[in-house]
Amino acid sequence: MEKSPIVFLTDFGLKDAYAGILKGVVASISPQTSTMDLSHEVSAQDILQGSFLLATSFSYFPKGSVFCVVVDPGVGSDRKAICIKTEDYYFVGPDNGVLWEAASRNKIKGMIHLTNAAYFLNPVSNTFHGRDIFASVAAHISKGFNDITLFGKPLESCVKYEFPRIGEGRDSLELCVIHIDRFGNLILNIEHESFNRFVQGREFSLSINGERISKVFSHYAQARDRELFLIASSSSHMEISLRNSNAALALQAVCLDKATLIKKLRSS
Amino acid sequence: MEKSPIVFLTDFGLKDAYAGILKGVVASISPQTSTMDLSHEVSAQDILQGSFLLATSFSYFPKGSVFCVVVDPGVGSDRKAICIKTEDYYFVGPDNGVLWEAASRNKIKGMIHLTNAAYFLNPVSNTFHGRDIFASVAAHISKGFNDITLFGKPLESCVKYEFPRIGEGRDSLELCVIHIDRFGNLILNIEHESFNRFVQGREFSLSINGERISKVFSHYAQARDRELFLIASSSSHMEISLRNSNAALALQAVCLDKATLIKKLRSS
Amino acid sequence: MEKSPIVFLTDFGLKDAYAGILKGVVASISPQTSTMDLSHEVSAQDILQGSFLLATSFSYFPKGSVFCVVVDPGVGSDRKAICIKTEDYYFVGPDNGVLWEAASRNKIKGMIHLTNAAYFLNPVSNTFHGRDIFASVAAHISKGFNDITLFGKPLESCVKYEFPRIGEGRDSLELCVIHIDRFGNLILNIEHESFNRFVQGREFSLSINGERISKVFSHYAQARDRELFLIASSSSHMEISLRNSNAALALQAVCLDKATLIKKLRSS
């Protein structure tokens, strides 16, 4: 029988052996499980970034996939280690909210506080639960232990971390940057359907860091060289892009920067 | 039956989830296909770099491998999505030339304009054809759909991007840097056989950015500490190296920098 | 039969195709072998770093794993290519000491000078033995050729590279930094058991680069924001950490920096 793949998302980077060790742990417990990397380059301890990458990616993986997420500033403290079972997936990681945006989009079926040390490495360190708990539990799930109540005690609730909400004015929306990708594109906390519903095909103006953007294109090459514009990103959020260049550098933008979207009621 | 592996080459970087999503798409369509990464760190939109990495690497992969290449500044525009079938491999990617140097070295058997949406994800975005078209088609090829005419319409020609040609003088060659590796080695657009044929074992002088190089060694450790020298690189091109240091930094060299090779007719 | 996995550790980086090519070579020779990456981001030619990552990680991989290590400044010179068989693992790489700390912790059973070109790629370059020798031999081992005497001549000894020793004074230890991880944590050349035996629960003072550290915590979140402290790292070595920040930057520390540990004989 095909084993469920395990998908890793961590802030370990690739310079150290931490990410590699996770795979060694999985291969030791369940040799036939295949593993994939969503990213190991989440900025250190950045729960928003981890949350964004997971929430906008999980649905492209096979049903049954086990996401093993290690963005875990509280490792070794009393923050819980948890597993969330959803309609189609398993999410294993720390109870600091990083799993929430993804899991809540896929109908949560149950949550477990991981307490059963029989499924952990022995001993469990205080500094690397990714290795000693999360990868080990993920490997056991993939191996076929798919009744998550084996791993600990049912939880009624967990820490919820949500993307910043849109502020709604009468003819304006207060948005913010929730992710900056390697091309310097700025991903906003508004999906393109909501954007279209708000703008209704009229003229608009998006202000961010002293610049104004008034064009939306359907693909990158529509823009002139060095033109700032909006586009529906591949994650379905609206994205600010700078043709043939890097919008984040040009706008000196960082995550959580504000952007104000105003619709013009009458085309001028 | 063993599935053909899929080999990825992109400019997505590893900070975002883009590269991971490609694997999720493949695993969803063809769970038993193994995937490998040639690199995801091609400089953004750099077709020369992508072209070099692909052309100098593909032959080390198993016959039947499917190369899924996403260096794609024109995504969503009218640039075509294509598949090239060669003697031993499949190359899937944008029709911007990035596949050409590799494919043309392996006897092209057919080219297809990818138009059959039955083999794409649904919907197809305007910003991420790597996910919605290229990875999806590659997965179907790996799964066993190896008649590429299924995927679209035969093409008579495609965009050809070739490495810069060598300029030939009477006793000199005008070369250029076509790649800089992580060690700072400068790879030139001349293969070592052509170099040997030109120099014929005599003295030579290679000028680049104000420096002259007159030695060729067979392995790195032959050079003195901090000595600049030529060597046959592992890709069979000649390479400028600086012992125990970084030639690119020392010469302030970038891709496409010129280098003049002069052979001395009489050894002095 | 399950093939032994191959685990790569190199200083190739991920920008070039070198790491990808290693996997192509393995897949060509032994298509069913799974491969894992310990890291490809060892600093160029840094044998201490490669040695540290390997020695502190290998035991988390399945028994039978083949470690293919390419940190190889002497490639093409007369440095030997070797394979070390230990109680549970195979280590393949250059004879420059990088394999020693790991192999010697797992009971060495035999060492071979790799000389049998029947198991190499043909031709063998002078610049990329990772591809032409190490990956090729590793793939043959994984494929089932587990009698390493096939690959060359038995060796009586190999180059030994050991972590710097602890200097022992009457009431002090001279330590040094042997690794800096992506979070800026400074890993010291003392294991936490030795640390505990020396300090015996009393007060201590660790001096490094003009700063003094006198606290040891069991997990990161115990420290106050921006507090410097010691902690048992996941590799079992003691580690200097700076809460919510980067100890290496704050202390301007680099590998091999000295640190003096003094125990206070009477609590003051």
Image (cartoon, coloured by chain):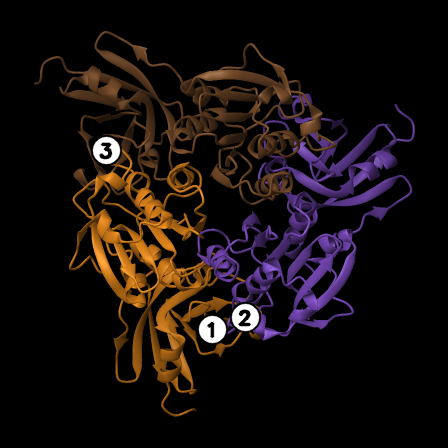
Chain colours: A orange, B purple, C brown
Residue C214 shows in this picture: yes
Are circles 2 and 1 on residues that touch, CB within 8 Å? Answer: yes
Residue under the image location 20 percent in, 50 percent down:
A113
Chain bearing tag 1 is: A
Residue under the image location 40 percent in, 31 percent down:
C57
| Crowd around label 3: few <14 · some 14–19 · many ≥20 (10 Å) | many
In the rendered view, tell whether residue B254 sits above or below residue A126: below
Q: Which residue is mark 3?
A: C228
* Three-letter amino acid code at the position of disc 1: Ile
Q: Secondary structure at mark 3?
A: strand
Q: Where is residue C128 shown, x and y percent of the image?
A: 65, 32
Residue A253 falls in image quadrant = bottom left
| Crowd around label 2: few <14 · some 14–19 · many ≥20 (10 Å) | many
Q: Secondary structure at mark 2?
A: helix
Chain bearing tag 3 is: C
| Mark carried by residue A231 | 1
Residue under the image location 76 percent in, 54 percent down:
B87
In the rendered view, tell whether residue A256 sits above or below residue B224: below
Q: Which residue is mark 2?
A: A220
Q: Where is residue B152 shown, x and y percent of the image?
A: 67, 72
| In front of the other: C120 or B18 | C120
| In front of the other: A27 or B187 | A27
Q: Quadrant of the C terminus of chain B?
A: top right
Q: Secondary structure at mark 1?
A: strand
Residue C216 falls in image quadrant = top left
Per the model, the C-alpha gap separating discs 3 and 1 is 45 Å
Residue under the image location 78 percent in, 37 percent down:
B192
